[in-house]
Image: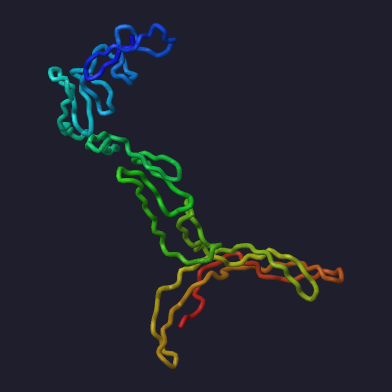
Amino acid sequence: MDDFCFGGVRYLGASLEKNTSGCFCPNGQFRAGNHSNSCVFDCPYCKGPLGEPKMPGDVWESNCNLCTCNNQTQTEECFPNPPQSAPVCSPTGVLVNTSCCGHQICVEKNCSYNEKTYKVGDTWKDATHPCMSFSCSKEGIQTETRVCPKENCPEEDRIWDNQHCCFTCNQSCAPEVSSFNITINNCTTIIEMPVCQGQCVSQPSIRVVLHGDLQVEQKSRSCQERRSERRSVTLQCSDHTTRHYAYKHITSCECRSCGILR
């Protein structure tokens, strides 16, 4: 028989003798309700938050209340769920509320940056922000920006650090070889000649002098020739002859006062 429960009482159901095979309760069990698919041994008097059958002695949580099916009255009894003390998390964990009831659990904190996940304590760099460093803390992503010293020199004289964040000026005053295309009286050649290159720190001395009127005088310094030697170069002429010329080949340079700024 396809018996079922209603109001805590077992009712006789339809006969299964002429029914085909299907899903029915095992022998000794019957459906918890006329339209229920749950099989029980005894007709329950209590129902859970979703209408599911509850037997005497069952305990469950519903709407932040702790409920039980009373053994004597066979009815639901619910009381406010007692508050639980917050768990103690690890140094890299944070408390997270699991429901509106205020229940908390510990969750390991992570940081997400550019589709990558970092743990608390991890540090990283981003090539698009070379002067910034990033770290993951329990409060989230922390940033630190590096402050570069103020330098002013042409791009070719800048020496960048490994992160290409800060640069220093190449202040080494020294000869650097450059190519020159020389033309003299229809005679030409290409010559490699050293040129003094480098940054020199200006002299900080400033004084007031008399040049008809009182004026402020400040000396500056530039990279200039210190030593040189005479060398010769051969030019090819348009009439298929050659000519020889002497030139000054710089061998060393130095920072030297080059004038007065007023």
Location of residue 58 by image quarter: top left
| Vertical relation: 136 (above or below) 55 | below
Q: Please give the count of numbered marks on the rendered protein.
A: 0
Q: Position of residue 143 (x, y in %)?
A: 37, 51
Comparing 41 with 211, the one in front is 41
| Vertical relation: 83 (above or below) 126 | above
| Vertical relation: 134 (above or below) 29 | below
Q: Furthest-left residue in view?
A: 72
Residue at 42%, 45% in the rendered image: 113
Quadrant location, the N terminus: top left
Quadrant location, the C terminus: bottom left
| Vertical relation: 182 (above or below) 4 | below
Comparing 193 with 2, the one in front is 2
In the picture, measured across the screen, residue 63 lies left or right of residue 248, that is left
Q: Position of residue 60 (x, y in %)?
A: 22, 25
Residue at 40%, 43% in the rendered image: 112
Q: Position of residue 241 (x, y in %)?
A: 85, 69
